[in-house]
Amino acid sequence: MNVALTIPEANEPHPSLLAPPAVRLFLLSFVALFLELMVIRWVPSEVRLVAYYANLMLVSSFLGLGIGAILTARGWRLFRWFPLLLATHLGFLVLAGYVALPVGGGEMRFYQLTETKVYAYAVLTIVFLLNAIVFVPLGEEIGAQFQRLPSLRAYGWDLLGSLGGTVAFGLFSFLHFAPLAGFFIVVAAAWLLGARTARWRSLVAYAVTLLTIAWSTTREPTWWSPYYFITIRENQLKIDAQPGRPATGSLVAVPAQPPPANLLTMKDPPLYTVRVNQDFYQMHGTIDLRRYAPGADRTRLLEATFAAYELPYRVVPPPKTVLVLGAGGGMDVETALLHGAQRVDAVEIDPVIAQLSNRYSAARPYADPRVFIHIDDARAFLQRDSARYDLVAFGHLDSQALFSYGASLRLDGYTYTVEGFRAAFARVADHGSLVVSFIAGREWMAQKLVQMVAAATATEPIVYLQGGHIVIIAPKRPPPTPAEKLGEWTRVRAAPSAVDLATDDWPYLYLAQRAVPTDYAIIIGLLLVLSVGALLALRGRTLGPGDGHFLFLGWGFLLLQTKGISDCSLYFGTTWLVTTLVIAGVLLMVLLANAVALRFVRSFHLALYLPLFLSLLLLIAVPREWVLAQDLVARGLWTVLVVPLPVFFAGLIFSTTFRASPAPALSLGANLIGATIGGFCEYLGMWIGSTALSYMVLAAYAASLLCQLRHPASGPAQGAPASPPANASRIESA
């Protein structure tokens, strides 16, 4: 008869409702990934300060997980503090929602401070540090499970949990994203994982967390789209009449009431403002001035407001077929219909925006039988569509969000490039025109747009300017000499200026020149110093030079993942679905590599680096323009069969060396710290472009190979205590 005696390890966590290490590891990884995505999705909508820094939220999450994994050997049992840390972090985020964006230097941003404020940088730094601290207990607990299981088996459960978190969050966003429900999922799973001794204290902290989220997201009626946090206001006329001065009027946004039942037929219908992430985005209503009382102050004000939509039709011949890219609430679509268009294809990436138009627009253009709505990315639609139109219009699709939590690129990044304009111009009929309307705000932005359209169309575009609003018209057949003045709009000739044109390799419309903006450099530099300082303080004798191999693997992996998301978004559109599928595909490929290492590849061999480098060189050698020119099936095959190859071989190298590591938690921590550095390096794309980032991926894996040659991962890390075997806690005797 065999009797098994269990001896608790020094760093074994408190007993919980879910004690089996494999189950705990799966749930911990699920919670970590789901929480990462929740924070990255919710924070930019609540805290405008973080709107263009979502990637740093991801990076700080990796930093916290890595530090936590390194701390495993100290047995601090930090997971008991997770509820309090989470409540503190989310509470500070709600308070930080009142801080404006810092000055962007050479980057155009919407609704930012007009001058540099030190407190904005201080608040940003605190946000990222608190986010990292929240993930430290999760990293420590994940590391503890790695010490209780064989390395590759633990890694497999870790990957399964991450994959589950990614898929669950994708479904959650698709069905109906709601922060309160999402954080409830996190809280419920974390509470089950928590220690019995701290359960009631944790319950109080979790209750505070959920109340904070509830308060921040239910202050007014809201909608959550896959891209934005949306609220609606109604515009009311405010007359400013002062003695001795002419009366002036302005539209003031007030909380919206439910739309009137006779909205489609009423006289003087309301005009609604759609706000995304708490700032103005677009208007929903009718531009048909016949619906308003003639001569009224409100009508005159609306006529001036709607002039930008009407202007192109005063220059080009009346179009019969129109393509609107970035249709939004449908005002560009309605304008085309009012000028006799017989067919309008309306492309809008956000399904909720289109649904709200059907509810709040007094014209309801998407219900017109002449209109065909396409919920799609504009650039992706241009690649798939072969029809030609009398007029192709870019309808103010200036974005206020990043397209992915792993990149610093805006949602409209690949639409506003020279190649994007060229693709749109190819859809213009021989007698038609391309129209680009944009609220430029800055002179360099207006000049950049004009130069990009000129480069893409090989024409001298017709340009009208009014304040910061620009309308660019590129006809294939020059019309009669356009008027120098159209109402308040003045025709201008843009002079060449020192701006870098956005291309598919450098898709940064909102940057004047190739450079990392000052504020990014300040924040990244500060976080790097703090990260290195924290590691040096915690390092002691627990992290040796042999772990540089795992650090560079993490560095290269994150850049490789970011590059994959970017390329696939160019091929298929910058939609949330593409991003989710790419991330899930990457995790599946790493999981497959781990399974192959577990079943077939018993030991690491340097020859594994050869297919990794060959596959990376293949992706560099084949231009993305060539892939983009292929049909949908060929692009799909390339994406499924070729793009994931480096991920598979890198995963195989990681798994075979990780299995031989005597300290798996420390190796995992080094890998996550490397991913943190890779996340920081992603911002270099603003300076060097996408292709150059591919060479940085090569350099990272080459550094990994060098470390493996000098300090093999199969040997003990210098100064690292040898971890006990996974089953050392169990002694069997007859």
Image (spheres, helix red, strand yellow):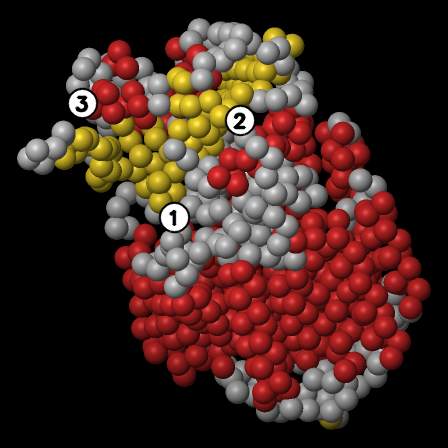
Q: How busy is the neighbourhood of tag 3: few (under 14 within 10 Å), some, or many (20 plus)?
A: some
Residue 22 occupies quadrant: bottom right
- Classify mark 3: helix, strand or loop: helix
Q: How busy is the neighbourhood of tag 1: few (under 14 within 10 Å), some, or many (20 plus)?
A: some
Check disc 3 and report the residue beneath it.
Answer: 297
Q: Which mark is residue 493?
A: 2
Front residue of 147/237: it is: 237
Front residue of 470/146: it is: 470
- Classify mark 1: helix, strand or loop: loop
The answer to whether residue 555 is above or below residue 110 is below
Residue 247 occupies quadrant: top left
Residue 500 occupies quadrant: top right
Q: How busy is the neighbourhood of tag 2: few (under 14 within 10 Å), some, or many (20 plus)?
A: few
Q: Amino acid at mark 1?
A: Tyr
What distance separates the C-alpha of mark 3 from that of mark 2?
33 Å
Spot occupied by residue 625 in the image (x, y as percentages of width and height): 76, 35
Of badges 1 and 2, the one in the foreground is 2
Q: Residue furthest right?
A: 607
Q: Amino acid at mark 3?
A: Asp
Spot occupied by residue 338 in the image (x, y as percentages of width and height): 39, 10
- Indicate which disc, 3 or 2, sits on the residue closer to the N terminus: 3
Q: Amino acid at mark 2?
A: Arg
Spot occupied by residue 483 in the image (x, y as percentages of width and height): 45, 14
What residue is drawn where x is 76% and y is 42%? Answer: 640
Residue 165 seen in render: no
